[in-house]
Amino acid sequence: MAKALNAELLQAEQAKVDANVLSGYDLVGFGSGIYYGKHHESLFYFVDRLPAPENKRAFIFSTSGIGMPPFIYDFHKPLKKKLLEKGFDVIGEFSCRGWDTFIRVLNIVGGINKGRPNKKDLRRAEDFARGLKI
Ligand SMILES: Cc1cc2nc3c(=O)[nH]c(=O)nc-3n(C[C@H](O)[C@H](O)[C@H](O)COP(=O)(O)O)c2cc1C
């Protein structure tokens, strides 16, 4: 995604959040693995501290152990709600499976989704990111 968008990558935990943190960017992607049904808490902490964006388009991405149809349970919903409240325009969302060794017994069998995101997932991610430029 970063390659397709020629984007800068920032880790939420290490980001210096000040009034200018978003200046110079017209599209901001927010993503992490899914933890207990939502994005990682460090991302919520980061978004909470962001200044209100001016015409900032955003997108959301994630990897998760299991895939849930959004109409049953939407892992992106809590972060999306926060971004919309903040004033972002959320223009796209991407998710795919990620290697998951959370449950102890899954560790013994090597976890689920080993090797994910795989080449196909990464290609989908790149295509998704390209689509955001249109
Ligand atoms: C503590 C913990 C909680 C998790 N909770 C969920 C969950 O609620 N739903 C899910 O589908 N996957 C869950 N997972 C699996 C992760 O979302 C998955 O492994 C993801 O690819 C991790 O991405 P990361 O390594 O980039 O953080 C959990 C993993 C851990 C370690």
Image: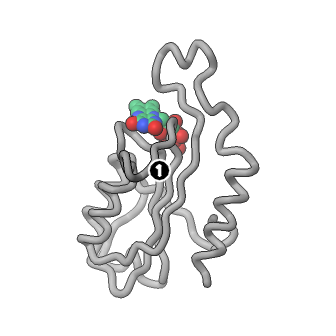
Callout 1 secondary element: strand
Position of 28 relative to 11 (above/below): below
Q: Viewed as shown, does residue 75 lie left or right of 100?
A: left
Task: Please tell me which residue is depicted at 53% across the width and 26% down the height of the picture.
Answer: 101
Q: Quadrant of the N terminus?
A: bottom right
Task: Please tell me which residue is depicted at 48% across the width and 45% down the height of the picture.
Answer: 33
Q: Viewed as shown, does residue 38 lie left or right of 33?
A: left
The percent coordinates of residue 84 (x first, y second) are: 29, 71
Task: Please tell me which residue is depicted at 45% across the width and 48% down the height of the picture.
Answer: 69
Q: Which residue is mark 1?
A: 32
Colour setting:
one colour
Q: Residue furthest right?
A: 119
The percent coordinates of residue 75 (x first, y second) are: 39, 49
Q: Give the amino acid at mark 1.
A: Ser
The percent coordinates of residue 44 (x first, y second) are: 31, 55
Position of 13 relative to 128 (above/below): above
Q: In front here: 95 or 72?
A: 72
Q: Residue furthest front?
A: 71
Q: In front here: 22 or 73?
A: 73
Residue 36 lies in quadrant: top left
Q: Quadrant of the C terminus?
A: bottom right
The percent coordinates of residue 115 (x first, y second) are: 70, 36
Task: Please tell me which residue is depicted at 62% across the width and 67% down the height of the picture.
Answer: 128
Q: In front here: 42 or 118?
A: 118
